[in-house]
Image (cartoon, rainbow, N blue to C red):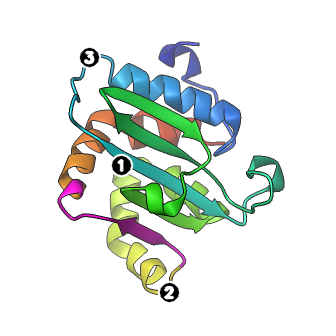
Amino acid sequence: MSTNDTATERYELASPEFVDAFREYMQGRFADKDFDGVSFNYSWIGTGAPAHLCKEGSDIAGFHWRLRDGKCEIGQYPLPEDENDFYMKAPYDLLRILLDMDDATGAAYMANEMQPLLDDGRIALVWKDDAMLPVIARYIIIADWRNGFFSQHIA
């Protein structure tokens, strides 16, 4: 399936179909980008997720994004927390809402509603090294995943 073929398809967040479509989208976005020497792991972690989306023996669903050795990898399930350079962790239903926003809605949400969720621990944004944040942010901007994928494809 090409990125254009998925224009109206919606997927359950963290389902194998979602992860496959997101992989295809991201690999398309990065096809002509040179990120040799760029290396990081980023996971989205949804707790209390529906059992059919969880790794066996867990209530966690999610996915990860990895740039390594000049390659973009998208994988089923989040990486273990200590293997991530950055991760977002939230209850699955809240994670679904957060990711389903376009850029404008997401910016307004972050400005007006995110801080109480961070303060009470419902959302955790965790990173290992402040120096990695601008690097990761650069590739998030290139990916344009809110407008280009998440807001269009999360059921």
Alpha carbon of mark 3 to alpha carbon of mark 2: how far? 41 Å
Confirm or deny contact between disc 1 and disc 3 (CB under 8 A).
no
Tell me the tag on residue 32: 3
Q: Is residue 125 magenta?
A: yes
Alpha carbon of mark 1 to alpha carbon of mark 2: how far? 24 Å
Q: Residue at x 44, y 83 (%)?
A: 116
Kind of residue sitting beneath label 1: Asp
Q: Residue at x 69, y 40 (%)?
A: 15
Kind of residue sitting beneath label 2: Asp
Q: Decide if residue 137 is on the left or right side of residue 112.
A: left
Kind of residue sitting beneath label 3: Asp
Return the residue at label 1. 103
Indicate whether 75 appears above or below 34: below
Label whose residue precedes the other's in the sequence (1 or 3) = 3
Q: Decide if residue 143 is on the left or right side of residue 6.
A: left
Q: Secondary structure at mark 1?
A: helix
Q: Is residue 51 visible?
A: yes
Return the residue at label 2. 120
* Residues shaded magenta: 122-132
Q: Which quadrant of the structure image shows residue 125? A: bottom left
Alpha carbon of mark 1 to alpha carbon of mark 3: how far? 23 Å
